[in-house]
Amino acid sequence: MYYQMFGLRLAYKAHMAVGGKQGKVITAAIATTAAKVDEHVLSDVLTQHRQTTRLPIREVVADAKYGTMDNYLSLDQAGMVALIPPHERHGEPRGIWGRSHFQYLPDQDCYLCPAGKVMKKIELNHHKGRFIYRVEKGSCRSCEYQAKCSRSGNDRKVSRFIRQELVEAAKERLTSPSGEAIYRQRKTLIEGIFAQGKQWHGLRRTPFRGKWKVQIHFWLIAAVMNIKRVLKEVGEKGLLLPGPNQSSGQLPSANSPRSKANAILISFGWIMA
Ligand code: SF4
């Protein structure tokens, strides 16, 4: 598939997860076409992580591309903690007041606009997983704040996720000291792995055409990177299984507390063809 951003070139996306206590092991590597929407890949990444590690996931740390209502809901239902900023597709509206100027009243499930008018829930946007709120029809046309608040005198609308509390909880976690730390860690660890993959393992460009060929290429790269990391650990820490004449060093067993992964860090990058 050709992707405009790169001037009509063939491109794929590489979604990767790392786990382990120090986030050094690649536990999922999924290649998709450029057209596949990132947010839809999260469940595949989690499934592959589980198949690889056979370990439960407690926290999912990922960037805003994965921060959709569907993903918050599915993580919540699966008992996983989301450390993912919400994906605000359009951000705050340009040139007019943003959502922070509107006060949500939880008891009445409505908003108060800056002029003190009630904005009632009028519809559900299934695709975006958001409820839409609006002032009474025609209210904005005669409002003194119209220039700052509403484009062309149209009735102003604001939206709210169907389970906004999940979004707020994720935002709160991300602003806590531990949340900030793990999110920073995600950036350095997984972006570092992507950088290494591109620089030394051919992840920047694939010689193959077709999603499955690119997928196999990506798995092989991930496997090689993991093996190199294991060898480095073994070499540095002397974690060797004792041979017939050896008495020192042992690899940790799959059930040892050290091997229990409970956070998974996720990101994606581009593979050019
Ligand atoms: S423009 Fe509409 S939404 Fe904005 S303050 Fe006035 S009445 Fe309220």
Image (cartoon, helix red, strand yellow):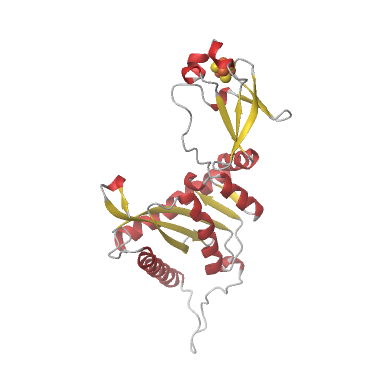
**Vertical placement of 144 versus 258: above or below?**
above
On the image, the x and y values in percent for residue 118 come to: 66, 21
Residue at position x 44%, y 72% in the image: 234
The residue most toward the front is 137
Residue 13 placement, left or right of 199: right
Residue 227 placement, left or right of 137: left
Residue at position x 57%, y 22% in the image: 101
The residue most toward the right is 107
On the image, the x and y values in percent for residue 42 come to: 51, 55
Residue at position x 47%, y 33% in the image: 91
Numbered-mark total: 0
On the image, the x and y values in percent for residue 89 come to: 47, 38
- Which is more toward the observer, 89 or 248? 89
Instruction: Classify residue 236 by image quadrant.
Output: bottom left
On the image, the x and y values in percent for residue 215 come to: 39, 65
**Vertical placement of 66 versus 49: above or below?**
above
Instruction: Classify residue 210 by image quadrant.
Output: bottom left
Quarter of the C terminus within the rendering: bottom left
- Which is more toward the observer, 96 or 132? 132
Quarter of the N terminus within the rendering: bottom left
Q: Quadrant of ligand 1?
A: top right
**Vertical placement of 159 versus 270: above or below?**
above
